[in-house]
Amino acid sequence: MFASKRSGRRRGGPKGTIKDPLRARLKPIPEPSDEALVKHDTASPGLAAGGTPAAGRTTLDEARRKGLVGWLQLLGPGLITGASDDDPSGIGTYAQVGSQFGYGLLWTAFFTFPLMSAVQELCSRIALQTGVGLGIALRRKFPTWLVGFAIAGLLAANTFNVGADLGAVAAAGELLSGGLVKTLWLIIPVAVLILSLQLFVSYATIFKIFKWLTLALFAYVLTAFFAHPQLLAVIKATLIPHLELSRDFVMALVAVLGTTISPYLFFWQASSEVDELKATGATTPLTGRRGLRVKELQAARLDIFIGMAFSNVVMYFIILTSAAVLHAHGKTNIETASQAAAALAPLAGPFAFVLFAVGMIGSGLLGIPILAASASYALKEFLGLRGDLASKPRYRPTFYIMLAAATGAGVVMNFMHLDPIRALFVTAVINGIVAPPLLILIILLGADRRIMNRYRSGRLSLVLTGTAAGMMAVAAIALLGTTVAGA
């Protein structure tokens, strides 16, 4: 079955000179065939970058026919995006929000779920319709300077996010070693490990390894029951939005929105869908395709819905657990990894730091590659270059140098003596400020009849994505206003 689906792929010999500017300048070689270009992974044979079969995205009909295996194969880019959304930045933000404001922001988990689902569905639909990443699609519709400005904001936000997440993973390593190994000692080894995985291992394997580590985050779900939270207070805070006009509360709201509806997720979702299409030969680099199958869109929507649900469940219980364990006992200002780990004490007791550290390390090793890769995807699409995580570095060195540069900038940031836990929160705030203008461009693109044809955004999509952009813009403006007023 897989072979027949791949029949559209070019399997012949090399054609023309190498289509990578750096490789062409240093040592021109022939452009490799598709088979030679792709990293072959013996650990995950037949899987695309998104973790789905290399023959392309599994449809709902195929999932029903294959049973459990089919339903698992259906989960790809959406699930990875949802899991990566709970990166160290998310964990740190939710823990700080819960400790500082108690149950006050529990409602945001239910509020952001439909919004982030609609945003990721829009990014997926654009990629499936056009066959190219967001960088290329945006550049075709809007002035180059405008798209360049938006992507520059994304690169800045991602670089800071990579640095904060690297610091958090290293801090978790120090916590796990009992303080014997210092955080700064681990920054470079962690960065080298992540770059090595990206260079030599397919993302399908990276995802398979580290997604199990992120399951430690479900410890927050169990801890919530051990902590005996006030049930009526929890229900009220979940169903009735609580708002304050203080600078700290507005900053917390911007941080929550920024870490759930993050700019890097827009590009990662679209690029992952394009990678899935490339596996079938249904699209080509830079030129893309025109047309979208309904079954593809249905499968993508279910994948995204499940991924975003996973992300928001984890978010909800981290806030709830931190509120019940920390805020309720007067601990309202988390400054260290040890303090954040204390939220798991009712479940794990003296071993709470182990659960916290494993969850933080797992989520970081899953999220950091996505952060760096999404920045590289956005930049290479904007510049009209080629390359992706499925390509061998020797044929696409420019893409991997951009990847290494993003990670290297994050490493440098950690030697500026930033507080790892505080940096996670600041990162979320930066994402919340960068996201609105970029999201507005994506919404306009998805509503364009000429580009999207019958798959342009409908009323529901426009309402939800417009609400997300508007809410984030208002929150960012309110943060600026309260900051100026308090200065």
Image (cartoon, helix red, strand yellow):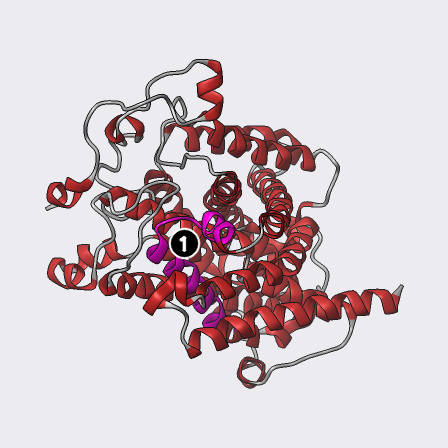
What type is the residue that disc 1 sits on? Leu
Q: Which residues are magenta?
A: 112-140
Q: Is residue 330 visible?
A: no
Residue at image location 55% in from the left, 40% down from the top: 176
Relative to 33, say whether 94 is above or below. below
Position of residue 265 in the picture relative to residue 395 (left or right): right
In front here: 368 or 215? 368
Residue at image location 62% in from the left, 37% down from the top: 410
- Residue 151, percent across and down? 59, 48
In front here: 323 or 263? 263
Q: Is residue 124 magenta?
A: yes
Name the quadrant containing residue 468.
bottom right
Residue furthest to the right in view is 487
Q: Is residue 481 visible?
A: yes
Position of residue 108 in the picture relative to residue 252 (left or right): left
Circle 1: element type: helix
- Residue 50, percent across and down? 33, 47
The mark total stands at: 1
In front here: 120 or 212? 120
Residue under numbered circle 1: 215
